[in-house]
Image (cartoon, rainbow, N blue to C red):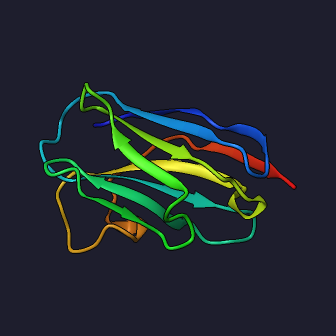
Amino acid sequence: QVQLVQSGGGLVQAGGSLRLSCAASARTFSSGVMGWFRQAPGKEREFVAAITWITSTTYYADSVKGRFTISRGNTKTTVYLQMDSLKPEDTAVYYCAVQVAPSSTVTVPWVYDYWGQGTQVTVSS
């Protein structure tokens, strides 16, 4: 069982920055993917970014490309999401997730095995 503990988030004005962190309880996976999703009220959970564990290949949703950066920590059990140039439409609950074994896609939530508790990000206009 892998537990993911998130930190960061909060309230920021449009154009500002926030950084989210996600720490895994144990290094129980040597391959796979860590990703970030978000869910706004009344909307489906949507893909934000992902990073592969072995090669550190990154993937981004078009809506955040160039503004958000996903990265891994030195301990290799932590992933970060640096969010710059935030917009009101980025307001959502953000979730980190782990895909233990690689699959053919990283952008859909059902291929991920473990989820963090979620953290609110609110961007005011």
In the image, taking residue 111 as reference, residue 84 lies left or right, namely right
Q: Nearer the viewer, residue 101 or 14?
A: 14
Vertical placement of residue 83 versus 64, above or below: above
Q: Residue at x 48, y 34 (%)?
A: 21
Q: Quadrant of residue 40?
A: bottom right
Q: Nearer the viewer, residue 110 or 125?
A: 125
Q: Residue at x 78, y 59 (%)?
A: 88
Q: Quadrant of residue 12?
A: top right
Q: Position of residue 103 (x, y in %)?
A: 20, 68
Q: Nearer the viewer, residue 3 or 48?
A: 48
In the image, taking residue 66 as reference, residue 54 lies left or right, namely left
Q: Position of residue 1 (x, y in %)?
A: 28, 37
Q: Nearer the viewer, residue 47 or 84?
A: 84
Q: Residue at x 87, y 55 (%)?
A: 125
Q: Position of residue 53 (x, y in %)?
A: 20, 47
Q: Residue at x 40, y 71 (%)?
A: 108
In the image, taking residue 120 as reference, residue 104 lies left or right, namely left
Q: Position of residue 102 (x, y in %)?
A: 18, 61
Q: How many marks do you count on the picture?
A: 0
